[in-house]
Amino acid sequence: TQKNYAEAEKECRSLIAAETRALGPEAGETLKSRRTLAALLTQQHKEAEAENECRQVLALSERTLGAEHPETLATCYHLAACLAVQKKTKEALKYAQRAYAGRLKVLGRDHEDTREANELLEALTKPETKA
């Protein structure tokens, strides 16, 4: 329910604050928690805030972990999904393609995350093929 998401958001924000103090803002665990926050925001229809959070996490992940790190690719996937919900299909497609190509290279074709990215990519390209 929305109440549960709101409570989870509050707890997630508290966790992020604690992780930021203890581990730093660029620590992998802090970034993962921020990605979780973005997902919670999306579930509550706070897409613009979720998109902003994903973009910030992506920039930090690229700088600290590298462009092809699985956590960076996960953030790409989440940003693509967030953009898709907002009907920003062209930009969502860009990030979905990046997530899929990166996961294919790093994790392999049969990995669950690669298949997940491929499904999002297919969903984003499907309407274009009907036009």
Image: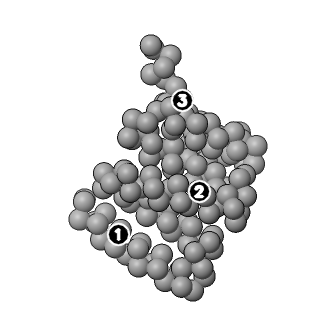
Q: Secondary structure at mark 2?
A: helix
Identify whether 34 is placed above or below 117: below
Residue pointed to by mark 2: 58
Q: CA distance from mark 2 to mark 1?
A: 22 Å
Q: Secondary structure at mark 3?
A: helix
The quadrant of the picture occupied by the C terminus is top left
Residues at badges 2 and 3 in contact (C-beta under 8 Å)?
Answer: no
Question: In the image, which disc is placed on residue 8?
Answer: 1
Amino acid marked by disc 1: Ala
Q: Is residue 43 visible?
A: no
Residue at screen point 48% across, 20% down: 128
| Viewer-nearest residue: 25 or 97 | 25
| Residue closest to the far bottom | 22
Residue at screen point 53% across, 60% down: 56
Question: In the image, which disc is placed on residue 122?
Answer: 3
Of label 2 and label 1, which has the lower sequence position? 1
